[in-house]
Image (cartoon, helix red, strand yellow):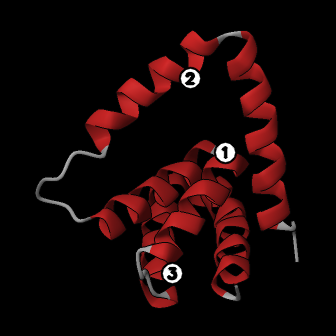
Amino acid sequence: MLNNWPEFLKDAFGAIGALAKDNPKILQGLQTIEGGAESKGALDGKTRELIALAVAVTTRCDTCIAVHASKAVELGASREELLETLAMATALNAGAALVYSSRALDAFDQFAKK
């Protein structure tokens, strides 16, 4: 296990909450941007979360991996779908994405065990 992802996510939300308390406009701005990405359209929520996981891998954002792995599990993503998504991220980002794909897979497996 590379990380305790549920605990990591809890701690990350605590740190982000402290930042948002001291400067609420940061979180408000992000929520505005995320609102556009979450609108219902051609892609379902599960597909959007898998895309978000691929982007999280390529940008090397552990908190993003935890958030979107958790949401992908909640929305019914399968491990096979995740593996195909991670293959695309790896193909587009080569070695760095391969390393972070192992982190996303580790996170996904831990959230799936709940």
Left or right, 37 with reference to 87: left
Tell me the SS state at disc 3: helix
**Circle 1: residue type:** Cys
Q: Nearer the viewer, residue 106 or 94?
A: 106
Q: What residue is pinned by disc 1? A: 61
The disc, 2 or 3, on the residue closer to the chain's N-terminal end is 2
Q: Quadrant of the C terminus?
A: bottom right
Q: Please give the name of the residue rendered at 46% of the width and 89% of the height, measured from the top-left corner.
A: 80
Q: Distance between the residues labelled 2 and 3?
A: 31 Å
- Relative image position of residue 19 (x, y in whole percent): 75, 21
Q: Residue furthest front?
A: 21
2 or 3: mark nearer the eye: 2
Q: Please give the name of the residue rendered at 79% of the width and 53% of the height, measured from the top-left corner.
A: 10
Q: Please give the name of the residue rendered at 30% of the width and 41% of the height, measured from the top-left corner.
A: 37
2 or 1: mark nearer the eye: 2
> Local crowd at mark 1 within 10 Å, few (<14), some, or many (≥20)?
some
Left or right, 20 with reference to 71: right
Tell me whether the residue at label 2 lies in contact with that at label 3, contact meaning CB atoms closer than 8 angstroms: no
Residue 45 placement: quadrant: bottom left
- Relative image position of residue 92 (x, y in whole percent): 45, 55
> Local crowd at mark 3 within 10 Å, few (<14), some, or many (≥20)?
some
